[in-house]
Amino acid sequence: MKFGGTSLGDGQRINNAARIVKEYVENNEVIVVCSAMAGVTDTLFALVDRASRGRVRDVEITLNNLSEKHFKAIDDAIKNEEIKKDVKSIVKELIEDLRRAVLSILYLREATPRSRDYVVSFGERLSTRIMWGALTELNVNCKYLDGGDAGIITDSNFGEANPLMEITRLEVRRRIGSLLDRGITPLVTGYIAVNEEGVITTLGRGGSDYTATILGYCLDADEVWLWSDVDGLMTADPRIVKNARVLSTVSFNEAIEMAIFGAKGLHPRALEPAMKSNINVRIKNTFNPPHPGTLITSKPEKSDMIVKAVLLVKDVAMISVRGASMVGRPGTVAKILETLAKENINVMMISQSVSESSVSIVIKREALPRALNRLETALLGTSLVEDIESEDDVNVVAVIGERMKGTPGVASRVFGAVAKKGINIRMIAQGSSELNISFVVKEEDGYEAVRAIHEEYGL
Ligand code: ADP
Ligand code: ASP
Ligand code: MG
């Protein structure tokens, strides 16, 4: 069971999450994975940024706020004075460690990917200790472990580390297995792991989901439950479409596609270990536990739905590379992709017009300046490319559903619905899996386009 940040948003909620765990440990072996309290990971990233720019006062204030937030959560989550005292002293020590790390960044005015991972790891380490207190108060025999202590070992790609699955499997079985054998409930920090030298790494934003499925895979779990603040995966982001509906089941492929396009902030790789070992994943709501949630499974229930979900990806930018002489000259696309890959910039969408005189790609917005800089250096002035243009005020709309495959007319219906609203489509791509159609619109049209398709398909 993994509890997301909102589900651990304050002391009250941590207490609520602990009660949910308590209910299940009586008849099951449960492993608990905790995210950082809501907002804390963002704050820690900001802290690193401020420290590396030498902003002493900001750093002090932020550290104090973080400390206060966690101490208040302890007061609200735990009543027993003895346990409270224990947790407070553990948390106090962690905050001191955090302070030291941040101060060293402050003095050096330099943050490395490695030191950044170390600092952001404190979010999960803090929340897990508070959860431990809340569960101990409920008489659950439990032990907290950091990702590395639980046996999760990754490469050294700080910020987005990849688990070394087979060694991890051995280690996790040895370490977590022995706790379970002794009737102890393990509480594991989400998001963080260690590399082979024992240095702390992180699995990428939203990585606690990934921690949960990695552990599920390693321990042959019956199911992995991701407790969040929504009843399940929905046909659209409920903040965009008021009457978005909860999907009762989706296939792994659909869920992976949804994750890539940002549904529920689900970590895009989180479903891999579960899919590989065929472990069902369930998304449930801590604020509404009786709701069955969404089941992600290899055998979803039969449904007539052709389109399952419509998602919006914000914070993206589109780059168009034009040049008449690109026609019939192989290698232009390869050159573009290679240039971006060298900068570690991920291409989310790519499309080339039939005439081949232009190639459009979509990337994360924050990477745009770097991408333009590199592409201009690499391509302009060659005979291949005449012009590079960019738009940073766009959104991607992704339409997802396994049954779109082989159903004719989906594209025309989707684009028809958008056209009816007078919205201009800037670029289109369809994955060869036919599991999704995605297209680019101006940012101001994003919500409207999602609503139009949601309505067209009666989702
Ligand atoms: P957690 O903290 O539990 O990991 P996240 O914030 O990562 O939760 O994800 C949950 C949020 O994702 C929801 O509150 C909801 O607003 C948003 N969301 C976006 N798209 C969807 C969708 N299609 N279905 C469900 N939730 C969605
Ligand atoms: N706390 C981490 C994040 O905000 C991991 C997670 O919540 O899944 O990205
Ligand atoms: Mg999340």
Image (cartoon, helix red, strand yellow):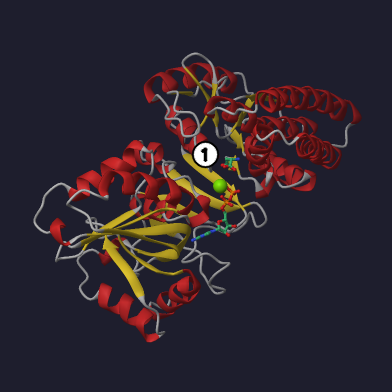
Residue 333 position, x and y percent, is 21, 50
Q: Quadrant of residue 404?
A: bottom left
Can I make out residue 318 in this image?
Answer: yes
| Residue at (54, 18) in percent of width and height | 199
Q: Quadrant of residue 130?
A: top right
**Which sits in the foreground, 272 or 54?**
54
Label 1 CB-ligand 2 distance < 8 A: yes
Locate the N terminus and report the quarter of the image it occupies: top right
Residue at numbered disc 1: 207
Q: How many marks?
A: 1
Residue ranking furthest to the front:
381
Q: Going by the image, does 1 lie left or right of 379?
A: right
**In the structure shown, which secondary structural element does the residue marked by tag 1 occupy?**
helix
Residue 40 position, x and y percent, is 68, 42
**Which sits in the foreground, 403 or 293?**
403
Q: Going by the image, does 226 lie left or right of 274?
A: right
Q: Quadrant of residue 165?
A: top left
Residue 102 position, x and y percent, is 70, 27
| Residue at (34, 49) in percent of width and height | 347
Q: Amino acid at mark 1?
A: Gly
